[in-house]
Image: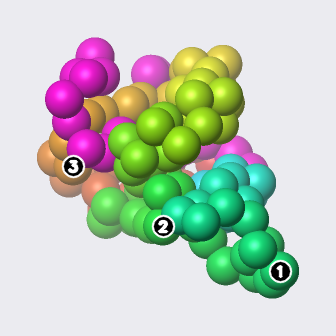
Amino acid sequence: MVSDTSKELYILGLTQQGKAFRPSDWAERLAGVMSQFRPGGAQRGSHLGYSPWCTPTAIGNVKCVIIHRDLRDYDVRAWDFCVNFAKDNQLQMFDHKPELPPAAAGSKRSSE
């Protein structure tokens, strides 16, 4: 469950069943689509870097995207796009940095 008071939403590259989500560059792709949503709006060349409101990262060896609540305040449709992406692909979401079990945190390819 995602809290309305949390500042960040973590979308993990793990399905609800605990399998790694593919393709392996999904986090970079999602963050790339969101690159235009940034403080001050899209600017020339803003597509060349990630928005501070949507950043790809990893927790252990699990890819994730961190979505900042400021994105929702800036453009609720962009926020909904990210949340619905996670829901449609049955990805795990957390309103805090999740603690991963050792098997998930250390495994690079849990579904291959």
Instruction: Report how far apart the C-alphas of labels 3 and 1 lie in the structure.
Output: 33 Å
Local secondary structure at mark 1? loop
Local secondary structure at mark 3? loop
> Which portion, as a residue range, is magenta?
1-23
Instruction: Report how far apart the C-alphas of labels 2 and 1 lie in the structure.
Output: 16 Å
The mark lying in front, picked from 3 and 1, is 1
Local secondary structure at mark 2? loop
Q: Which of marks 3 and 1 is nearer the N terminus?
A: 1
Residue 21, horizontal then vertical, whole percent? 60, 41
Viewer-closest of 23 and 41: 41
Residue at 31% from the left image edge and 45% from the top image edge: 8
Q: How crowded is mark 3: few (under 14 residues within 10 Å), some or many (20 or more)?
A: some
Q: Earlier in the sequence, mark 2 or mark 3?
A: 2
Q: Mark 2 points at which residue?
A: 52
Residue 102, horizontal then vertical, whole percent? 20, 52
Residue 19, horizontal then vertical, whole percent? 51, 35
- Return the mark for residue 97: 3
Q: In this view, does 94 lie to the left or right of 20?
A: left
Give above or below for 33 relative to 84. below
The mark lying in front, picked from 2 and 1, is 1
Image quarter where the N terminus lies is top left
Residue at 25% from the left image edge and 44% from the top image edge: 7
